[in-house]
Each structure stands twice: as structure tokens, then as C-alpha cells.
Amino acid sequence: MITTNEILETIDMISQQHLDIRTITMGISLRDCGHTDVKTCCDKIYDKITKLAEKLVKTGEDIEREFGIPIVNKRISVTPIAIACECCETEDYVPFAVALDRAAKEVGVNFIGGFSALVQKGFTVGDRRLIGSIPEALAKTERVCSSVNVASTRAGINMDAVALMGRIIKKTAEITEGQGCAKLVVFANAVEDNPFMAGAFHGVGEPECVINVGVSGPGVVHSALGKCKGQPFHVVAETIKKTAFRITRMGELVAQEASRRLGVPFGIVDLSLAPTPAVGDSVADILEEMGLESVGAPGTTAALALLNDAVKKGGVMASSNVGGLSGAFIPVSEDAGMIRAAENGKLTIEKLEAMTCVCSVGLDMIALPGDTTAETISAIIADESAIGMINQKTTAVRVIPVPGMKVGDRVDFGGLLGSAPIMPVNPASPKVFIDRGGRIPAPLNSLKN
């Protein structure tokens, strides 16, 4: 039974602590949209998305209004286009991105994800065509997000793909002034039911159509920890678990209601703590509340490990449908505390890399000097892929080499994407290492059968 006190707590979390549903994401299969003719294929993609997602935004707005729960984004994820459109007789996959963008605008969603390829063990013809089209596709669209999975625990690391993605990121930055890179992520161990952009795609094992919800609430966790100052870590962990439970229950409620109203199966609740640039909505603030002078200080990785684990433990007790990434995100440009620490020189890329060993994703929304080489970007991707591969977890890289910018400058991406200081990168060259190509074999722990 829900008590009056619980209702008042929830109202306070929403009004004072930035609690929200970060996204309702409709996953749509495009596996039946393939056709040898480009125009026919694009028309089928557009028609299917606009038909299935016609009421998505209105439904989200209705739930938001009736329940008093903020729902920040309404989004769509689709079958990786490299798979869905591979039978099409064309070298250029940009028209498919344009069709996705047109459909997204028609139904009114914020972003549409799935201009994607899965190449952890090698390339198909469609994979190469899609990856080669990414820079122009992101330059010609507003709402399309792209992702490429280059590694997995079972397959190892496709170093040819890693090298290629370094060049693709550089080219995308050059023709979009960096903005396109904010919608491009490179994964290891990508999951099929992720509702968060830029990495969302609708996996081939997913249903025809599904509703996934991503919750948030760093401000709520931060506020809860403020009430247990000086307490030992087991009390901190228990407090986070209880808070994550309440946050996830709200996500479960919204997901179930959206599923019922849209007549679409309920997929998962992703209980990731996804920060925003707003003051008071920061994962860095949570870590500092545990006693760190600044995020990035010694102890940061341990604090983040505790946070991530406690969030998962609390969330899985609140829903039998927890999935996606589920944990804590550490995007630099989207977290006011991370921005502050990076500007003060207390948070470095090397420390962020260490933190990614224990958090949900990886190096996220990090602005780099414009003269950062493609090989350096590739090596950063390789390092993150190795962390994901060995630790059997999802890792990712979303970095933005901003043309004309140097260390100490600041770039503004706008909206939820925030702004970020240009962070220094180790100047030692990894070119010879990256130029080897081939595949880093899967680790021994991949042999599970």
C-alpha cells in the first residue's frame, strides 16, 4: 500500500531533486523493410515508423500531465540499418538516414537511433557502406544517432574497425564542426535494448515493436546521501539502494502505462543515473557527497563502483524488467560537476578511463583538441574496448575532436548535450600500434559453453 509519506517524498523528488523519466523509447523492427530499390526501401522505413510511432509523443505527454511525472524525451530506436537495408543495391546509405530523420520529425520524437552496424568480428558489405556514410548522414540530419559495435567479450576487438572509426569520427567532426560526433558512439558489448542515445538500436532479438523506459535521478540520490553524512559505507550503499528502488518503481509505472495505452509490449526499465547540465542533477555531486574533495581525486573509482552496484541492487528489486545499461553515466559535457572538475584540472581522461571500469558505459561526451589525430582516437576506442571485453561489460566512446579548438577552450553543444572544456590528450603517438590492424583475440573468459 502506498502511504501519504511516500507520495509526498515522490512529489519532493520531482519538484526539488530533478527526478524525471529521461526517455520513453519505442523500439521498431525494420527487418521487413529491405528492398533492392533505394526509394522503395526508404518509403517502407518511413511508413512503418510513422505508423507505429504515430501516438508515441502524445501518449508520453498525456502520462506526463496526468501523473505529474516529467518525461523529458520521447525517442525511437530501429534495427541497425546496416542489417535492415543490406539487400538494397546502393553504395550510399545516406538516404536511409534522411528517411529516418524525416520520420522522426513527422512523429515529433527528439532522436532516432539505429544508423548502426555491428562489426565486432568483421564487416559485411552493408556494414562498410553504412560506416562510410556516417559523416555525411550526420551532417544532413538533425535527429539521427549512429553507433558501431567494434568489440565483444565473445569476439574480441576488430582493430580494423577501430582504426576506421577513428577516421570516421575525425571526418564527421570536420564536416559538422564537431556537432555530429555528439550523435556518434563506438561500443564494445553493445546491448540490444538500450533506450538512451546516441547508442540506442533495436536488436535483432527484440520483438516487432517494444517500449523501453530510461529513468534518471542523480539529484535524488545526492539529496538522500546528504542525510547520512559521516555514516559508514554500508549505510551509504543501503541508502542508495532504497533510493534506486523508488526511482525504478516510478519508471516501471510509466513503462507499464505507456505499454498499455500504445498496445505495445513493455520491454525494460533502464535505471541508469543519467545527469544533465542542470545544477543539482550531477553524478559528480554524488561522488563528492561521499567525501571526495573533487571528482577525479583518489578514491573516485571506488566511490563510483559503490554507486553503480547499489543502484543496480536497488533497481532489480523494483522491477523484473531491468535491462539496458542500468547504472551511472559519466558524460563530461552533460554533468555540471564533471565539467567543473575538468575545468579545474582535477579530472583527466586517464582518470575517466579508470572510472569506466566500474560504471555503466565509458568515455562519454568528451571534447578533444581539433588536432587530435585519428590514430589517437582509435587508440582511445581500443583501450575502452579492451576494458569492456575483459570485464564482460558494455563500454563506449563518444568523443568530439572540435575543429579549431585547443586545450582550455570551451564548446557548447546545446540542450541536454551541454557544454565542455577541451581536455588534453596524451601526445605520444599510437600510430604504429593502430596501423597493425587485424583482430585482438577474445579473452579466455569468453569460453563459457
Image: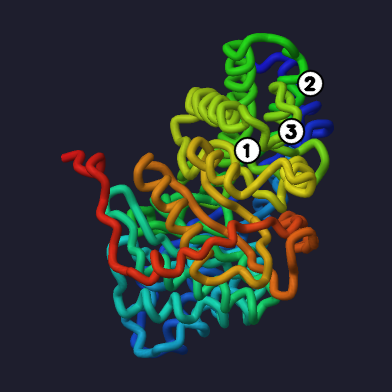
Which residue bears the numbered disc 1? 273
For the point 47% across and 75% down, the residue is 45
Q: How many residues crowd around disc 1 within 10 Å: few (fewer than 14), some, or many (20 or more)? A: many
Front-lying residue, 408 or 398: 408
Secondary structure, mark 3, is loop
Mark before the other along the chain sequence, 2 or 3: 2
Comparing 86 with 161, the one in front is 161
- The numbered dot on residue 294 is 3
Answer with the quarter of the image where residue 445 lies.
top left
Residue 161 in sight from this viewpoint = yes
- Residue 8 shows which numbered tag? 2
- The residue lying toward the viewer, choosing from 419 and 251, is 419
Q: CA distance from mark 2 to mark 1?
A: 22 Å
Look at discs 2 and 3 and give the one toward the viewer.
3
Pick whichever of labels 2 and 1 is earlier in the sequence: 2
- Of marks 3 and 1, the one in the foreground: 3
- Occupied quadrant, residue 320: top left
